[in-house]
Image (cartoon, rainbow, N blue to C red):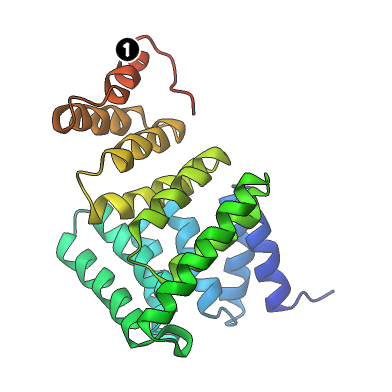
Amino acid sequence: MDVSPAQLLVQAKERFALNDYHGAIHLLEDLVDRGRAFADAQHLLGLCYNLVGQPERALELLDEALRTNPRYVEALVHRGVILGELGRTEEAEAAFEDARQVTVRGQDGLTAHHAGKLANHHALLGEAYAEAGAVDEALTQYRRALELGPAFHDLRLRLGKLLLEAGRSLEAREELSAVLAARPHSVDAQANYGLACYLAGDAASARETWETMAQHHPGDPRAQVYLALLERGEGPVL
């Protein structure tokens, strides 16, 4: 039976939610091969490739998504994140500025003022779901909040923490990297980005992050605790 593009995208999102990025890539590449990959599919495929360590391919796909929909805020933000991770800081800043401008011009026809208000409402609803233990719905609400307010770094930090709690460390690393790109000296972003790196299997980046944190925030005990656990070969706990 021929599966429709919409059904393939739903299946790919299910694979993505289960951290099966290779499975999602397989489904989404099927859409690409058929010539029926639309902006959402290209964006998700780009995220998957970045999460499996192929950032250049990820950028190609995000560029495709933006050619399809130049006002795709999430694609602009994630493009900025990947460029920042590659050390292409000027290009990353330009991508984040493009995302801000889309919101200023009115995402979905909304003024920046109303988009910001709605973003905060989505975040409050997301927090209510999180408190009730409905983590997947909480993540959905926070992602919607960030579509409306991509420069709301406090909301992105909270999303990163929720992703860590859900065991989705690679996605958490992606979001927390964006926070650090905008707020490089945020102690909470550094602490949680280090956790995301460690839980994703990158102990070296975790150590580097926590050493920087200890240098910039000597009064915060978390960095020393985490570094001591690393020295003993133990993992930090959430």
Q: Residue furthest right?
A: 1
> What is the quadrant of the N terminus in the image?
bottom right
Left or right: residue 130 versus residue 90 is right
- Residue highlighted by disc 1: 231
222 versus 182 height, above or below: above
The reply to whether residue 92 is visible in this rendering is yes
Q: Residue furthest top?
A: 232
Q: Residue at x 24, y 56 (%)?
A: 182
The picture places residue 214, in percent across and down from the top left corner, at 20, 26
Which amino acid does the dot numbered 1 rest on? Glu
The reply to whether residue 54 is visible in this rendering is no
User: Dot 1, crowdedness within 10 Å: few (<14), some or many (≥20)?
Assistant: few
Left or right: residue 142 versus residue 221 is right
**Labels in figure, total:** 1
Judge by depth and name the residue closer to the eye, 3 or 216: 216
Q: Residue at x 46, y 57 (%)?
A: 49
The picture places residue 31, in percent across and down from the top left corner, at 61, 74
Q: Residue at x 62, y 79 (%)?
A: 34
Q: Quadrant of residue 217?
A: top left
Judge by depth and name the residue closer to the eye, 32 or 179: 179
126 versus 91 height, above or below: above
Classify mark 1: helix, strand or loop: helix
Q: Quadrant of residue 198?
A: top left
Judge by depth and name the residue closer to the eye, 88 or 1: 88
The picture places residue 20, in percent across and down from the top left corner, at 61, 48
The picture places residue 177, in percent across and down from the top left corner, at 32, 50
Left or right: residue 51 versus residue 150 is right
